[in-house]
Amino acid sequence: MSMSRFVALGTVALLSFATAVSALTFNPTQDNRSIYAGTVIFNEPPDMANDSPSVAFSEFDSQITANSLFDGFFADSLAFQFSQIGERYIQGNGFVDAQVGFRFNELQAGDQDNHLGGPGLPTNSDGVSAGSQSLLEILFSIDMDAQYDVTGFISAGTGVLQGVFEYGASQSASVVLFDIDNNVALIDESVSEGGQDVSTSGILSPGNYRFTVDASVKVSNSNVEADGGGGGGGPLDSINSASAGFEGISLFLSDRDQPIPEPVTTTLAVLGLGALALQTSRRRRA
């Protein structure tokens, strides 16, 4: 074998080895994705639903609802999520909505007279509520430095159609990238009113991480002290709602740019291979 051919083969071997060791391994270790919806009215049986991937790390596409109705009072909630985990990415969309209130036209027969011009309704009760959650949470590990890019949009807010009753509401959407080994959040973005773009990049060291995207809402009446007729002025509905979601949220991982060998380093490597080939050739001739 000629020395030039030996050097060429050796160089190819070194490049192949360098390529092999630079391949990033993304290893999902725990799948906590789920959706939940629940409603309750006074002492009536609650309605609850939940769902999660049937197979860990598989595609998750699900929507659930919960609904309760009692003598004009209602509570509705909805939760949705579509998410995927790929070779080097996590991505998904999620939405939650909840609303509670009172609809005069849904009163049971014979009860409307009690709600017009008189108290009629339960007082000082917080027993009407609705809540839902869409949680996209994946734990993972990587074996070498990697660049991360997190992008997407999160939003949350409330809506009041009528305000006969006093209501309490909480809603939020958040994105968190947490370094488990060092107990520190690398990304912590959240919103409770309005919308917010998320666009963050950085470098992850080898180790264990948790990526969490959460949309949650809860609405409940805080003080029922009014009649369905708005003080005798005629039928009046009361509806309060809250919603939250995440859209196009994604975590992408890529190999961190590897330093290009300096010319001197490359030359020394080639010379070393050449010297080895020459020495081998001399031994064979001897």
Image (cartoon, rainbow, N blue to C red):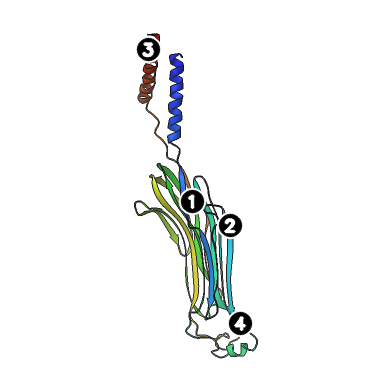
In the rendered structure, which amino acid carries the disc numbered 2? Asp
Q: Which residue is mark 4?
A: 104
Q: Is residue 4 above or below residue 208?
A: above
Q: Which residue is mark 3?
A: 283
Give the label, 1 or 2, closer to the camera.
2
Residue under the point 39% across and 33% down: 259
Please state if 228 lies on the left or on the right of 28 as rendered.
Answer: right
Q: Residues within 10 Å of mark 2 (few under 14, many from 20)?
A: some
Q: Which residue is mark 2?
A: 61
Q: Which residue is mark 1?
A: 151
Give the label, 2 or 4, closer to the camera.
2
Q: Earlier in the sequence, mark 2 or mark 4?
A: 2
Callout 1: SS? strand
Q: Residues within 10 Å of mark 1 (few under 14, many from 20)?
A: some
Instruction: Compute the Cα span from label 2 to label 4.
Output: 36 Å
Callout 3: SS? helix
In the rendered image, which quarter contains the C terminus?
Answer: top left
Which residue in the rendered view is the most extreme toward the right? Answer: 109
Callout 4: SS? helix
Find residue 117 and report its horizontal and vertical position in percent.
57, 90
* Marks 2 & 4, CB-CB < 8 Å contact: no
* Marks 1 & 3, CB-CB < 8 Å contact: no
